[in-house]
């Protein structure tokens, strides 16, 4: 391994050095400063006599005399089952007081793409215990379902609730063939505050979840460029646990917005032609290389489910970060500031939310036969009620028909009964659907045109008194 | 070049000078534009995209991490081509036509490794060749010399390649052969096998392009009923994420009455391709009950696969489509999403430091889009048969804003526009095709077909529906200000009729086993039922029946259930009678 003292230019997070041998693209680099500090970086561009290096920890402290070593390999994550229960920094080095980690393997963090032919379509219902998700936007094993939020919203609470409550119903009952497939959580923090990180850690410790978790921490005051490797470390670990050790892994990545900002910073330092709103033109591909690492693989027992969290700048979902994310992920859950200020917990707006894998994950034998119809009808009725709220402000309730008034009541009850369950309540799917029918029974049978007549027969509550209970409750 | 060439035909080799993502420059390489080259020690496949002085720029179809200067670059001297022959149906390829199932086996891993190559069609599999020419016959380029049963659904026509001269047949084989063996020999020495190659960036020749007059019947009410596309037509489906582009494309792939489907997943989700691979073999082709995969060829370059192969996958797809067109088939090609293709062009262009045009896209974006859609059409082939390629492209505008360059340049070319609408999707009105914004320029030329095949008042009824929906849009603006009850009775009734149009006719649940496919006859009957309600209800209103009573009749809500009826004819007949009876009993 050759050492160079040939740095010619330092610019933002980038260092340029002259070389006289072939250096591979993406190769790992160590830079030793005059103070004896060792910084790590990665080759971004390689030509015959000069290479561009992106330095994870930032370039401060580096001068022309710093020495540059090329390690001759791309970035690796040391993986082992012993990572469970450990807390690591954003580059995968332990920061707890635990024993040294002896890796079983060292895996390239730039995961190769899963062959679409080798995938197995995800369709196993995950019960999160949250009605707005289970009932309306069902999550399945191997799905990538981000939370679209904005700063100051309780997205972390929601993510923790999901991580705490998530289970797969049949397993609890029988647990037969799935034996050995355990559940693990991998938490990747990118640029969040110490306080937010503590909330997660406390929750993990309180519920004993830490034992079956691996935590990667890149906090707000940690190097920004490191954020571009953190999720890759996380996902490499997740893939290892899922596809080699049969775990059902739930990956929580927060906050993807900070990750994207780091990408933008590097792009700007390289003087690349920027894409929309200054973000790199390749951000779609880059994000896809993270999100597409969720899934199931034929013949393997484990799975990787991703819940990335992102805070939408200006609460605007046309911003490139949520926009590109939504184009890649299999749906999204919206945390809504208005619902939050009304005190709803969790403040999920189901209308723009979506789970694209829902249709194959619900129904007879999976959740319940009437689930799809109930969901469709509730979406339609809530949307109708939402529309009427605008109108009622102008013309008043009296000017509306009887049916319209029922839709308004439905929308209110939907929020107070169905959505606002609190961050601690865990509802099973039966309970979620049962509340759904309570609410739908506020509407006349004729209006339930999305529901099969057979299910109306079976589940519609003719009994008025039962309906009043619901109405009175709001 | 195509991967079926096993020979190492390198005409020259050079040395890597620099690597930046998918773009590699090489020194001392004697190459032409678009030549296929093998890059680095691992032999990664790439294509020459720029030549400047001694430097040749290559876009690499595989991941380049670890590749460095000094490594060799070998030129094959041939352009990027596909292998054409039996075995393309019921297959799934990556963007440069490597079969993904074969790669899985060769790599021994569910992950896509580098530097592994495989021909687009199996060179060893034997097919039963039935000749259709005899010694002494004279054949020309494009002529069919025999057939092979490729799948239960499709007879594969073996043709004289378009770039042959043709001549007199001097030898003909019959029986079991692999695709590399000669089955017909001509007097000028030309040998025809079941395998040909074609450079993907070049359209296959045809005699003539004709005006398309037959609809590509999709089984989707709003498409067939209001915005039909022709066989040989072009369509764009733009919409923000979650608005229904992929589901619409899947519905077309499942139910459109084309002979052959080429489905290109371009830079989208892996699971969406897996879904097709898992579902299609189980689903029945509505035309003949055979498995759907028997008429389908899949091309998958998912969003996490190499960007350069995303640029090429569209060409791979359209070339395969043209080849089946040459056999006289009606082919429908779906590309989901053409925006990812355009973005791949942009990414490569920016690495080449070309002068960026609008939104950073290269200045040739519009030209490339036009060239692609130009390859669609209803053709007279060089062998005299007629065949078509219909091209349907999804467009994914950033932020859902249709004013962006890919949407705008596409709309300038395509003749059918299915505008997806996030508001409709939010309220789960599916398919969320906005009926005010969408259009089909084929409507008039397809009406005669619908009038002959379905009902002679097809066009009239459609116009009625369009008028009611237009009126509803206007009335809704008033309702937003004063509420529905403030409208006069006849307008309230129009709103009620329009509601049935929206809920029963325009909405269609792709996930309902019956509603998912709606033959044009059913589409028509549904419309006539709503019109019956309309006519009878207005008569009742004229006769002085209060509007509330009309709206409240018991039978009308059953209009919303026509979609899910299998025996719809009887259901519709009964329903019309009941609606009529109930309304007439009110006065
Ligand atoms: N015709 C339809 N019937 C029922 N649901 C639909 C239909 N079209 C779209 N959807 C719903 O909308 C979701 C998003 O559709 P999709 O086609 O994946 O959107 P896009 O490709 O535009 O992002 C689907 O997962 C499905 O739940
Ligand atoms: Mg899509």
Image (tube, coloured by chain):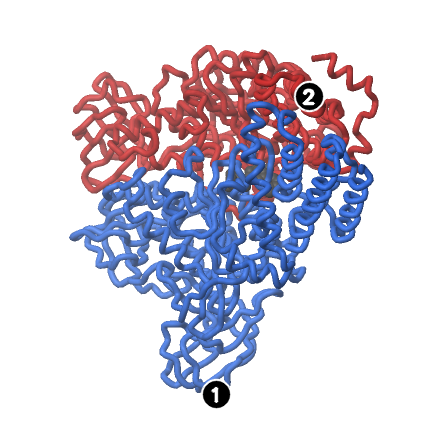
Q: Label for residue B46? A: none
Look at chain B in the picture and name its colour. Answer: blue
Q: Which residue is mark 1?
A: B135
Chain identifier matching the red colour in the rendered picture: A
Q: Position of residue B16 (x, y in %)?
A: 24, 48
Q: Is residue B294 above or below residue A364?
A: below
Q: Which residue is mark 2?
A: A405
Q: Could you say which is closer to the camera, residue B504 or residue A331? A: B504
| Residue B526 visible to an observer of this rendering | yes
Callouts 1 and 2 in the same chain: no
| Residue lying at 79% horizontally and 28% vertically, measured from the top left | A460
Q: Could you say which is closer to the camera, residue B34 or residue A235? A: B34
Label 1 lies in ligand 2 vicinity (Cβ under 8 Å): no
Q: Position of residue B83 (x, y in %)?
A: 43, 63
| Residue B103 visible to an observer of this rendering | no
- Given contact means CB atoms under 8 Å apart, are the residues at marks 1 and 2 in contact? no
């Amino acid at each position: 391994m050759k050492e160079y003292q040939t740095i010619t230019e330092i610019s933002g997070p980038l260092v340029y050095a002259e070389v006289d041998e072939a250096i591979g693209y993406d190769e790992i680099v160590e830079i030793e400063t005059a103070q004896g500090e060792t910084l790590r970086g990665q080759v971004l561009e390689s030509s015959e006599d000069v290479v561009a290096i992106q330095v994870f920890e930032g370039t401060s402290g580096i001068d022309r005399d710093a020495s540059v070593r090329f390690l001759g390999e791309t970035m690796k994550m040391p993986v082992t089952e012993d990572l469970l229960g450990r807390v690591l920094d954003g580059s995968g080095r332990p920061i707890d007081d635990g024993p040294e980690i002896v890796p079983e393997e060292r895996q390239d963090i730039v995961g190769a793409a899963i062959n679409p032919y080798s995938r197995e379509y995800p369709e196993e219902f995950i019960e999160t215990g949250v009605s707005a998700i289970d009932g309306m936007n069902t999550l399945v094993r191997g799905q990538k379902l981000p939370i679209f939020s904005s700063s100051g919203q309780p997205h972390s609470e929601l993510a923790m609730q999901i991580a705490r409550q998530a289970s797969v119903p049949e397993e609890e009952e029988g647990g037969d063939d799935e034996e050995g497939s355990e559940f693990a959580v991998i938490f990747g923090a990118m640029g969040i505050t110490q306080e937010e990180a503590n909330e997660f850690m406390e929750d993990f410790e309180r519920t004993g979840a830490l034992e079956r978790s691996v935590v990667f921490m890149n906090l707000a005051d940690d190097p920004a460029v490191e954020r571009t490797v953190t999720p890759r470390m996380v996902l490499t670990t997740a893939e290892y646990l899922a596809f080699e050790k049969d775990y059902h892994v739930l990956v929580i990545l927060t906050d993807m917005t900070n990750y994207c900002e780091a990408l933008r910073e590097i792009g700007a330092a390289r003087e690349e032609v920027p894409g929309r709103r200054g973000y790199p033109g390749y951000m779609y591909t880059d994000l896809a290389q993270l999100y597409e690492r969720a899934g199931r693989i034929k013949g393997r027992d484990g799975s990787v489910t991703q819940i990335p969290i992102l805070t939408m700048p200006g609460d605007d979902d046309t911003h490139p970060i949520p926009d590109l994310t939504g184009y890649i992920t299999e749906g999204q859950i919206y945390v809504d500031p208005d619902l939050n200020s009304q005190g709803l917990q969790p403040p999920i707006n189901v209308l723009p939310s979506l789970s694209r894998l829902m249709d194959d994950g619900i129904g007879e034998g999976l959740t319940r036969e009437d689930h799809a119809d109930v969901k469709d009808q509730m979406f339609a009725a809530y949307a109708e009620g939402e529309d009427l709220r605008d109108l009622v402000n102008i013309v008043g309730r009296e000017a509306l028909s009887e049916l319209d008034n029922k839709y308004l009541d439905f929308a209110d009850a939907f929020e107070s009964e169905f959505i606002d369950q609190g961050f601690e309540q865990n509802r099973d799917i039966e309970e979620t659907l049962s509340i759904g029918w309570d609410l739908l029974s506020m509407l006349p049978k004729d209006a339930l045109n999305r529901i099969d007549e057979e299910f109306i027969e079976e589940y519609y509550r003719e009994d008025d008194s039962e309906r009043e209970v619901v109405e009175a409750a709001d | 070049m195509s991967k079926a060439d096993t020979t190492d035909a390198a005409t020259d080799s050079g040395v890597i000078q620099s690597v930046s993502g998918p773009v590699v420059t090489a020194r001392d390489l004697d190459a032409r534009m678009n030549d296929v080259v093998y890059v680095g020690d691992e032999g990664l496949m790439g294509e020459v995209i720029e030549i400047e002085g001694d430097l040749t720029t290559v876009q690499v179809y595989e991941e380049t991490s670890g590749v460095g200067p000094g490594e060799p670059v070998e030129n094959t001297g041939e352009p990027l081509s596909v292998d054409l022959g039996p075995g393309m149906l019921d297959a799934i390829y990556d963007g440069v036509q490597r079969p993904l199932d074969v790669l899985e086996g060769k790599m021994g891993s569910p992950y896509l490794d580098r530097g592994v190559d495989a021909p687009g069609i199996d060179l060893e599999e034997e097919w039963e060749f039935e000749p259709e020419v005899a010694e002494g016959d004279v054949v020309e380029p494009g002529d069919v010399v025999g057939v092979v049963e490729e799948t239960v659904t499709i007879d594969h026509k073996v043709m004289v390649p378009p770039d042959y001269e043709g001549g007199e047949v001097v030898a003909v084989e019959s029986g079991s052969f692999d695709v590399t063996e000669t089955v017909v020999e001509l007097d000028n020495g030309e040998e025809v096998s079941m395998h040909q190659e074609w450079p993907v960036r070049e359209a296959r020749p045809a005699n003539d392009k004709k005006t398309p007059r037959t609809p590509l019947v999709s089984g989707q009410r709003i498409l067939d009923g209001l915005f039909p596309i022709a066989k040989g037509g072009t369509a764009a489906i733009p919409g923000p994420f979650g608005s229904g582009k992929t589901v619409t494309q899947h519905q077309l792939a499942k139910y459109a009455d084309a002979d052959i489907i080429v489905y290109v997943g371009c830079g989208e989700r892996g699971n969406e391709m897996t879904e097709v691979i898992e579902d299609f073999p189980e689903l029945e082709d509505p035309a003949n009950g055979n498995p759907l995969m028997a008429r389908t060829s899949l091309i998958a370059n998912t969003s996490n696969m190499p960007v350069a192969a995303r640029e090429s996958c569209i060409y791979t797809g359209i070339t395969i489509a043209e080849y089946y067109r040459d056999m006289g088939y009606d082919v429908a090609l779906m590309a989901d999403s053409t925006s990812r293709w355009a973005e791949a062009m942009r990414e490569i262009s920016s690495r080449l430091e070309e002068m960026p045009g609008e939104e950073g896209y290269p200045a040739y974006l519009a030209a490339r889009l036009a060239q692609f859609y130009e390859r669609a059409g209803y053709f007279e082939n060089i062998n005299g048969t007629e065949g078509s390629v219909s091209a349907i492209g999804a467009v994914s505008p950033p932020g859902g804003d249709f004013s962006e360059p890919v949407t705008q340049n596409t709309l300038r070319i395509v003749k059918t526009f299915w505008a997806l609408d996030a508001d409709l999707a939010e309220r789960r009105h599916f398919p969320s095709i906005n009926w005010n914004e969408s259009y089909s320029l084929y409507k008039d030329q397809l009406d005669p077909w619908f009038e002959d095949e379905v009902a002679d008042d097809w066009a009239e009824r459609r116009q009625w529906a369009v008028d009611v929906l237009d009126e509803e849009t206007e009335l809704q603006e008033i309702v937003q200000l004063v509420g529905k009850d403030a409208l006069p009775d006849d307008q309230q009734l129009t709103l009620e009729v329009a509601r049935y149009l929206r809920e029963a006719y325009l909405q269609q649940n792709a996930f309902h086993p019956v509603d998912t496919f709606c033959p044009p006859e059913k589409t028509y009957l549904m419309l006539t039922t709503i019109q019956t309600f309309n006519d009878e209800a207005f008569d009742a209103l004229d006769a002085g029946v209060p509007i509330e009573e009309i709206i409240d009749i018991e039978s009308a809500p059953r209009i919303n259930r026509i979609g899910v009826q299998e025996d719809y004819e009887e259901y519709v007949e009964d329903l019309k009678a009941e609606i009529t009876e109930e309304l007439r009993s009110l006065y």
